[in-house]
Image (cartoon, rainbow, N blue to C red):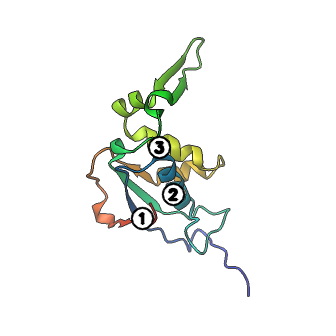
Amino acid sequence: MQTPMLTPATIRRSWHLVDAEGKTLGRLATRIAGVLQGKHRPDYTPNQDSGDFVVVVNAEKVHLTGNKWAGKIYYRHSQYPGGLRERTAAQVRDAHPTRIIEAAVRGMLPGNRLRARRLKRLRIFAGPSHEHASQQPKPLKGV
């Protein structure tokens, strides 16, 4: 018996809904990254982009352990001399609450040519409502 290999024509994508309220950021991000890669499927193929869509709601209510709201630093650089910008996790949450989850999931995906396509299937919303009700997302188990 041969191992079935996925092709782009045979991939069927489904939609999953994740409520981030009270969830720990790292544990949530690892589960989301696995679903975006397709590792939750029995027909997972490493060289194909076989993951599903993930909709995350309540991103502003995600939980960080310890003193990370004040101690975790997000860095950006403008590529000009002296252009390094630092913001704490609390400052990022107040300005753009979705970027904390997006940065965590991006860091947990492998840095290859499939990463950009996988991140396009991640939809993050700060509040409890989302605009993907017509896709009928199912709650993601194990989160």
Q: Which is closer to the viewer, label 3 or label 2?
A: 2
- The span from disc 2 to disc 1 (Cα, nearest Å) is 9 Å
Of residues 24 and 66, the one nearer the viewer is: 66
Residue at figure coordinates x 47%, y 37% from the top left: 66
Q: Earlier in the sequence, mark 3 or mark 1?
A: 3
Crowd rating for badge 1 (residues with CA inside 10 Å; few <14, some 14–19, many 20+): some
Give the residue pinned by disc 3: 102
Crowd rating for badge 3 (residues with CA inside 10 Å; few <14, some 14–19, many 20+): some
Q: Are marks 2 and 1 in contact (CB under 8 Å)?
A: yes
Element type at marker 1?
A: loop
Of residues 17 and 1, the one nearer the viewer is: 17
Measured as percent of width and height from the top left, residue 48 is found at 63, 63
- Amino acid type at circle 1 is Leu
- Amino acid type at circle 3 is Glu
- The span from disc 3 to disc 1 (Cα, nearest Å) is 18 Å
Give the residue pinned by disc 1: 140
Element type at marker 2?
A: helix
